[in-house]
Amino acid sequence: MIGWIILAALLALIAAVLLRTAMFRPEAGERGAAEPVAVDGAGAAERLARLVRIPTVSSYNEDEFDEEVFEQFRETLRELYPRVHEACPPERIGHTGLLYRWRGKRAEDPAVLMAHYDVVAVNEAQWKHPPFCGEVFDGELWGRGTIDTKITLLGVLEAAERLIGEGFVPERDIYFSFAGDEEVAGPSAPAIVEHMKRQGIRPGMVVDEGGAVVEGVFPGVTKPIAVVGIGEKGMMNVELTARAAGGHASTPSVPSALGALCKAVADCEAHQFPAHLTEPVRALLRNVGPHAPFALRMVFANLWLFGPLLTGLSMKLGGELNAMMRTTMAFTTAQGSPQINVLPNEATAGVNLRLINLDTPESAEARLRRVIRNDKVEVRTVHAQKASPYAASEGEHWDKLARAVGDTWQDSIVSPYLMMACSDSRHFSAICQDVYKFSAMALTKEQRGLIHNNDERIPVSEIAKTVEFFTRLEKSL
């Protein structure tokens, strides 16, 4: 009798799993044809080239900023986009901040479109073409900032310049927030947020850099996926320091400072933070999972059953999905003795953590201490910032953004995800719930690898798509 009950329960379970899998399908119906958008693609590429040629390299030392170069960039914006600067004269806020207000039919629930115009430093000797040449080779515009993020700044202003010229008035106020010190976590974006606070401005939505239209990042899915960040991880830098008696290497003591430190690092790497099905991951699986092959679709459709299996496999699979599901640790720096025959009195290692919302800097530091289990290894937090709260993945703001994305990249699946990197938009979470992260480009894996790397470049054809997207978005707001 018991055997029959077990068999019946097993059959019921299998039936439920198969039924849920059969129902876990892409939404019926094709995306309708989008209204055409007029874009001066060739002109936009020329203007981006001009902006790229201005080497706005930021520095952690404010005294090292080349103020003349940054002012040249701002003056070039005034030259290239005269209608925007006449209708929306920018305020200078903080060190490098620019805040434009495009007045709409109402001031309530405004939108903020963001970008940064500073770039990271370059090693010219390692570039195939000069890093600030702003020239086209084989259909690609080369130069630092072509992807990160002078192209999005250009897209915002190109769209506004044309729409203002056509007499278009947005339904609500739209602010453009640009900073020239994002790459060094500078004070300009926080200063803009504080300014808006004092003015009583509470944006309904914010759009900044983040996800992109990508391929080959989700198991078994061949269609491009437009991933829009609804949150971003926190960041935390921790220093581990082990101490022991130093001296001559001919009479070593055990454990040495370096040995204790290596064990601490090995223990941390052997005990990774646990994986969780956070809301951005669940949203990604809901949107993209129906396009996966049957076996994977069965897993994604039945997370109530296979969730633990998925989190368990995430570490072995690695990649971006794994990073979205857990707080990650990356050991990046280490130092012992400056000389090979000298025992160090202390050895240090630096680890960069990216925190999901379930972990705080305090809980993460406490976990590292528990894993290391050695009072002689000091664990010290050097810098920490919490993960940002999640924006809505449904409702008016999401729908407007998702529609502009889907109409521009018609063959893509539009989906929320969790952004692993940090951006200036995290500061806006203090005054806005719906802060989204989307870089309006289709980027291959190779192109994503060019961010902060040598030979940064973007296909010229993609520049027009960026302008097309922002034109649609600005008209919809």
Image (spheres, rainbow, N blue to C red):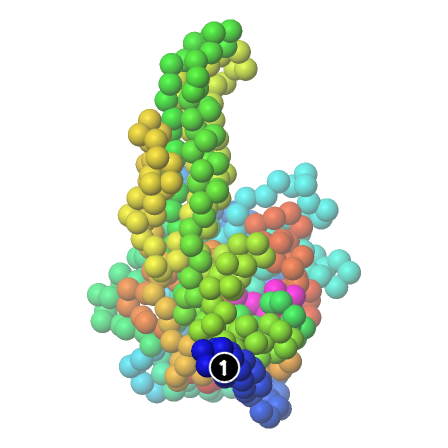
Q: Residue at x 56, y 83 (%)?
A: 18
Q: Residue at x 75, y 58 (%)?
A: 137
In-image side of 396 versus 218 (left or right): left
In the image, 405 versus 292, the foreground residue is 292
Quarter of the figure with the C terminus: bottom left
Amino acid carrying label 1: it is: Trp
Q: Residue at x 50, y 58 (%)?
A: 312
Q: Residue at x 45, y 48 (%)?
A: 272
Vertical placement of residue 24 versus 357, above or below = below
Looking at the picture, how far across and down is residue 314, in whole percent?
53, 59
Residue underneath mark 1: 4
Vertical placement of residue 64 versus 274, above or below = above
SS type, badge 1: helix
Q: Point out the residue furthest to the front here.
A: 1
Residue range of the region highlighted in magenta in the rendering: 211-217
Vertical placement of residue 40 versus 46, above or below = below
Is 389 included in the stretch rendered in magenta? no
Looking at the picture, how far across and down is residue 276, in whole percent?
42, 62
Looking at the picture, how far across and down is residue 230, in whole percent?
42, 69
Is 215 included in the stretch rendered in magenta? yes
Which quarter of the figure has residue 268? top left
